[in-house]
Amino acid sequence: MNRYSVATLNQIPLDWSGNRRRILDAIVEARKRGVSLLVLPELALSGCGCQNHFRRPDVLRQAIDSLEKIVPETHGMTVNIGFPFGVADGKHERRYNATAWISDGKIVFIHCKTRLEKKYFNEAHWFDSWKPSRIDLCDLFGQTITYGDYSHFRLTTDDGKDMFVHLELGEPNWSQFRRSDENVGLRIISSASPFALGKHQHRENAIRSFSKRNDCVCLYTNLLGCEGTPFLYDGAALIADRGEIVTQSQRFSYREFNVRSDHQPTENAVTPYEEFDRSLPLALFDYMRKSRSQGFVLSLSGGADSAAVAVLVAAMVRFAWSELTPQELFRRLDFIPGLADCRNPEEVTAKLLTCVYQRTRNNSDTTRNAAKDLAESLGAAFHEIEIDRMVEEYVNLMMTIYGQPLLWETHDAALQNIQARVRAPSVWLLANLKNAILLNTGNRSEATLGYTTMDGDTCGALAPIGGIDKAFLRSWLRWKETLGKFAVPALHAINDQEPTAELRPSQYAQTDEKDLMPYPILNRLERLIIRDELSLDGATQRLLKESPEFSESDIRDWAERFYRLWTRNQWKRNRYAMSFHLDDATVRPGDWDKFPNVCPMD
């Protein structure tokens, strides 16, 4: 093996023909480069997002059928392909997360994963864990195949020398990624590891360090894109040779596959702002095309959250336009009528993003102008409607039932919420008419504390920023105003405001932080109470030490308010639209930290 190559693939769960085509395209590209060994990601053949379908016998059979079509196409090279593998064990069929080591048109062995994932999803619910060091035999494609634990094996290179290989399925624990006990010449990591902000830097440093300490070559590859689940794959692929990164893939690429071989340097997103700027637009692109939706509808309020969502959709178009040819972009989105007539990114944005500003008497000209200017600067379609009459009709109707006037002094929450709820039907209707995805504009800080109106601003099929806190979001918007690949100067009017829901009359001077607490404090309490699992008193004491600039009474009030709102609003989080996993402070209901719907303070 004198020339190594790693490839990333943007796969679709259970899309057997499409997934197979992308794998074969990667093999053809690698062969053109004279590659001897091509490493593909974990579960590349099926996609990682099959979830409970991995348990179905027909899925395991289709995986084998698809693999059989690929094996003959590997002549003259070695290819490592991840796939779900089913094998009869008495009366039962065992299921394994496996990889096939195929050389010159024949399967040499099948390696089965021994250490199953627990952090992001319960892999043991779908697969059996293989016993370390055990090897067995099975009949496959008319020949006897050895399968089992091939995490360590010897390989003869093209020049006749023996090399010790360490083969790993899944992301290692990078903090324990140290010197090998064996004389490793080649370490291969085939992964399907969800993206998180800052994660790749740890991965890259660990791989570089390992290859230097062990005087060896490391190959790493990961899946690419969004499969329709909350997880996004960054498409990282790299080769490290004795401490030097000799090639990397372009992370968050819009291509269907990327093949990287020796000495192909690539610039990549490094800072959290850059990673955020690249990751969510790709997630939106993949979710839209894989669900065959014809764009997005957004209730654009002129505030930070909806502005961020609009900017992310526009960035999606610009990144795709800059990386793909127009013909390739239109081919990928050929189910959207009229898109191929667009001549530039602005026209594509107008086709894919429709923004609606829904005004009441409590909205200001500041937010209205900010929303209009932003939409126009991005090239999005912009519409404005008045909803005061509909709000008044609901209020008057309820007063006849309730039997008394509804006043701000006594019915504040109800009067705020009805405005948010009246905004929902019109944008849902518009999304239906356009066969588009209605985007929720809630951020993680709002989800954490339930600072949102159910069936109002929570409406939407997808919550793009539901996985990021408001403090980060605001700082990213300031960065995006002047920096990044596609800066948006029109964000200045957004960034110059204090975040507000604009649901109370102007004399109340409503702001989000006045209703809740300073966003940096909210973010810190979120990590102390949710991630670090401190009690209310423990988090309060920690915050008192860390934040002497605030009074003790304010900190105690904020901490108690946080804990009260966090514990009582699990029912809202259960109803949130799907958001994307971005870091270890996620509050998505399916993740590691759940409260009951009813949870008293004491």
Image: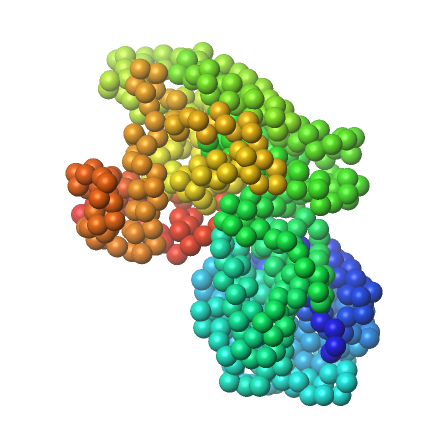
- Looking at the rendered image, the quarter that the N terminus falls into is bottom right
Q: Is residue 526 left or right of residue 129?
A: left
Colour convention of the picture = rainbow
Q: Residue at x 68, y 30 (%)?
A: 346
Name the residue at the bottom extreme: 161
User: Between 175 and 191, which is closer to the camera in this rendering?
Assistant: 175
Q: Is residue 41 above or below residue 139?
A: above
Q: Is residue 137 above or below residue 249?
A: below
Q: Is residue 73 visible?
A: yes
User: Between 409 and 424, which is closer to the camera in this rendering?
Assistant: 409
Q: Is residue 424 visible?
A: no
Q: Is residue 152 left or right of residue 543?
A: right
Q: Residue at x 68, y 80 (%)?
A: 109
Q: Residue at x 56, y 75 (%)?
A: 212
The image quadrant of residue 413 is top left
Count of marks overlaid on the render: 0
Please state the horizontal and vertical placement of residue 512, each as a whole percent of the image. Answer: 35, 30
Q: Is residue 295 above or below residue 542?
A: above
Q: Is residue 328 left or right of residue 500?
A: right
Please state the horizontal and vertical placement of residue 158, each as a whole percent of the image. Answer: 77, 82
Q: Residue at x 69, y 76 (%)?
A: 101
User: Between 354 and 216, which is closer to the camera in this rendering?
Assistant: 216
Please state the horizontal and vertical placement of residue 13, each as a whole percent of the image. Answer: 63, 56
Please state the horizontal and vertical placement of residue 544, each as a whole percent of the image. Answer: 21, 47
